[in-house]
Image (cartoon, rainbow, N blue to C red):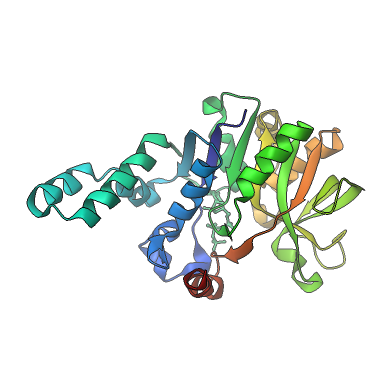
């Protein structure tokens, strides 16, 4: 049963500067609501009951957003505005499900994941990267179904342009299970066009086995001097762990770059 999700939020968000110099990018509005709420809704709808946020001291505003009870209560007393009451109830619903852990130095996604080690209760957990929105279809829900069938790890994926492979983790396939799902034989973090074994990119949804923590503990720095989750996933694949690439249906929106962020509001307003 996959009941826990983790969300790394401790990165610097340099691609969205200057907005991120004082603001957490995950709270930036996308068509009128913070990006992180789309991710939370996806988790809750997929049956997740506990969500662990990895934040840093610099991003405490994310915690404050969900812990602003006093402010809401005093406003509701004075105003009795049904819209505010509804929003408050929604925030309370999220708050009950969220736990916070800290990664104060952004050493990489792998290091961020390692911070959740002592909180993960079951054999498998879900990880979502909040820059990657997938609309119109609940990708996490589809991946959990797939995991229940094959009892392995699952990563969301899509085909990208060959000249763009250096932005993603790129994987190669050993077996096609069906049109949308593939057994993965290797994965490389941000390869050059030459190095890339394919144009199948890993997108920010992962179902991982908690054995990954053992590997993460020993994980050396990789590309750009960061500790990447992809490098530990590669070790697990080399050690014969089952990893399935799931080509999701649904609309992908990359909210981590400025052009992508701007475009996401336009796209969601059309849905
Ligand atoms: P990215 O490296 O893609 O994004 O991390 P970033 O660091 O937030 O932004 P840029 O690249 O500087 O513009 C992918 C996800 O992993 C988290 C980020 O918050 C983001 O959600 N992350 C990254 C961490 O939690 N810790 C890290 O050390 C690095």
Tell me: residue 34, above or below residue 154.
below
**Residue 229: where, in percent of width, then height?**
67, 44
- Residue visible at 42% across and 68% down in the picture: 31
For the question of whether residue 202 can be seen, the reply is yes
Q: How many marks?
A: 0
Tell me: residue 151, above or below residue 165.
above
- Residue visible at 44% across and 60% down in the picture: 25
- Residue visible at 75% across and 50% down in the picture: 246
Query: In the drawing, does residue 131 fall left or right of residue 217?
Result: left
Query: Which is nearer the eye, 261 or 102?
Result: 261
For the question of whether residue 227 can be seen, the reply is no
Look at the image and tell me in which quarter the N terminus lies: top right
In this view, the residue farthest toward the left is 78
> For ligand 1, which image quadrant applies?
bottom right
Query: In the drawing, does residue 202 fall left or right of residue 101?
Result: right
- Residue visible at 57% across and 29% down in the picture: 117
Query: Which is nearer the eye, 1 or 80?
Result: 80
**Residue 206: where, in percent of width, then height?**
66, 44
**Residue 79: where, in percent of width, then height?**
10, 55
Query: Which is nearer the eye, 148 or 202?
Result: 148
**Residue 89: where, in percent of width, then height?**
29, 44
Q: Which of the 4 image quarters holds residue 218?
A: top right
Query: In the drawing, does residue 79 fall left or right of residue 30?
Result: left
Query: In the drawing, does residue 131 fall left or right of residue 201?
Result: left
């Amino acid at each position: 049963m996959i009941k826990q999700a983790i969300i790394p939020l401790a990165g610097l968000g340099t691609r969205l500067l200057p907005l991120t110099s004082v603001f957490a990018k995950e709270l930036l509005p996308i068509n009128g609501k913070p990006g992180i709420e789309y991710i939370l809704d996806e988790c809750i709808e997929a049956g997740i009951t506990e969500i662990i946020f990895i934040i840093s001291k610099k991003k405490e505003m994310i915690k404050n957003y969900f812990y602003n009870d006093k402010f809401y209560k005093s406003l509701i007393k004075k105003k009795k505005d049904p819209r505010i009451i509804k929003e408050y109830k929604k925030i309370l619903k999220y708050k009950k499900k969220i736990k916070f852990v800290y990664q104060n130095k952004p050493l990489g996604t792998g290091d961020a994941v390692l911070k959740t080690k002592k909180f993960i209760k079951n054999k498998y957990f879900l990880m979502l990267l909040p820059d990657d929105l997938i609309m119109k279809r609940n990708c996490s829900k589809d991946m959990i179904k797939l995991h229940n069938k094959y009892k392995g790890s699952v990563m969301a994926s899509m085909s990208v342009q060959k000249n763009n492979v250096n932005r993603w983790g790129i994987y190669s396939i050993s077996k096609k299970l069906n049109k949308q799902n593939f057994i993965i034989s290797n994965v490389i973090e941000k390869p050059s066009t030459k190095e890339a074994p394919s144009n199948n990119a890993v997108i920010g949804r992962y179902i991982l086995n908690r054995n990954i923590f053992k590997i993460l503990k020993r994980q050396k720095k990789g590309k750009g001097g960061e500790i990447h989750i992809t490098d530990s996933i590669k070790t697990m694949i080399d050690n014969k762990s089952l990893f399935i690439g799931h080509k999701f249906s649904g609309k992908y929106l990359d909210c981590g770059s400025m052009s992508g962020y701007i475009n996401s509001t336009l796209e969601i307003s059309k849905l």
